[in-house]
Image (cartoon, rainbow, N blue to C red):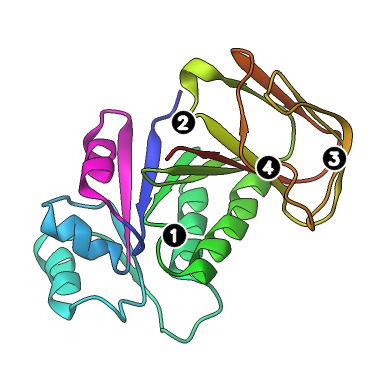
Amino acid sequence: MSKRTVIVSGGMLEEDFVLPILKSEDTEFVIGVDRGLVFLYEHGIRPDYIVGDFDSVPRKLVNYYREELDVPIREFNPVKDASDTEIALRLCIGLRRREIWILGGTGNRIDHLWANVQCLQIALDAGVEARIVDSHNQIRLLDRGITLKREEAFGPFFSLFPLELPVEDFNIKGAKYPLKNHILRPCDSLCVSNEFEADEVEISFVYGHVILMETRD
């Protein structure tokens, strides 16, 4: 099984949560994205790649990684057609990374968060497992059913939303609030904040794309 690649973006980065992930043996590849580069620099972490327009990063940091550590850098004009995180995600896919965690993908800017959630579609289409993670949330995009195990769950709560169109024949089994043959629509909040009832929760649907958010307080 391949080890994970971690994209460090410029959103919320909590030391106690982020550093153990970056230093874990399960992490073998790190990409610093724009403002996320500051976090890596402050904690003495050498990324394998750096990506961004660097409009919010001191120039000396970019020069340090380029000139002293010889880290590969992909620099872009701030006037571009994709976010820095999307560019980093596409880079990961091009490098054939199979498991990608995005840290710093959440924070104060909801527009940035939503753009990052939509970017998960890029990974899904490429057959790559990608997720957005912070200390309270884990966000994935599903194109097929999944079984959640209580002992492996990120948190006690989970919520489900369709990414685009309504998802028909949507089922939840083993949860506090089960569903059968439901139409999961973008305009209702029925599937927010569900919980485990059994040790395993089965989520199934025939067609569509579903955002899965696993959360904890």
Secondary structure of the residue carrying numbered label 4: strand
Amino acid identity at mark 1? Ala
For the residues marked 2 and 3, what is the alpha-carbon distance in whole angstroms?
A: 25 Å
Closer to the camera in the image, 202 or 177: 177
**181 lies above or below 96:** above
Label located before the other in sequence (1 or 3): 1
Residue 97 shows in this picture: no
How many numbered marks, from 0 up?
A: 4
For the residues marked 4 and 3, what is the alpha-carbon distance in whole angstroms?
A: 15 Å
Q: Residue furthest top?
A: 199
Q: Residues within 10 Å of mark 1 (few under 14, many from 20)?
A: many
- Which is in the foreground here, disc 2 or disc 1? 2
Closer to the camera in the image, 86 or 209: 209
Which residue bears the numbered disc 2?
Answer: 154
Which residue bears the numbered disc 4?
Answer: 160
Label located before the other in sequence (2 or 1): 1
For the residues marked 4 and 1, what is the alpha-carbon distance in whole angstroms?
A: 26 Å
- Which is in the foreground here, disc 4 or disc 3? 4
Q: Residue 95 at x, y = what percent?
A: 46, 48
Which residue bears the numbered disc 1?
Answer: 88
Secondary structure of the residue carrying numbered label 3: loop
Label located before the other in sequence (4 or 2): 2
> Relative to residue 152, is residue 159 drawn left or right?
right
Label located before the other in sequence (4 or 3): 4
Question: Is residue 205 rendered magenta in the image?
Answer: no
Question: Is residue 26 rendered magenta in the image?
Answer: yes
Q: Residue 114 at x, y = what percent?
A: 57, 63
Which residue bears the numbered disc 3?
Answer: 207
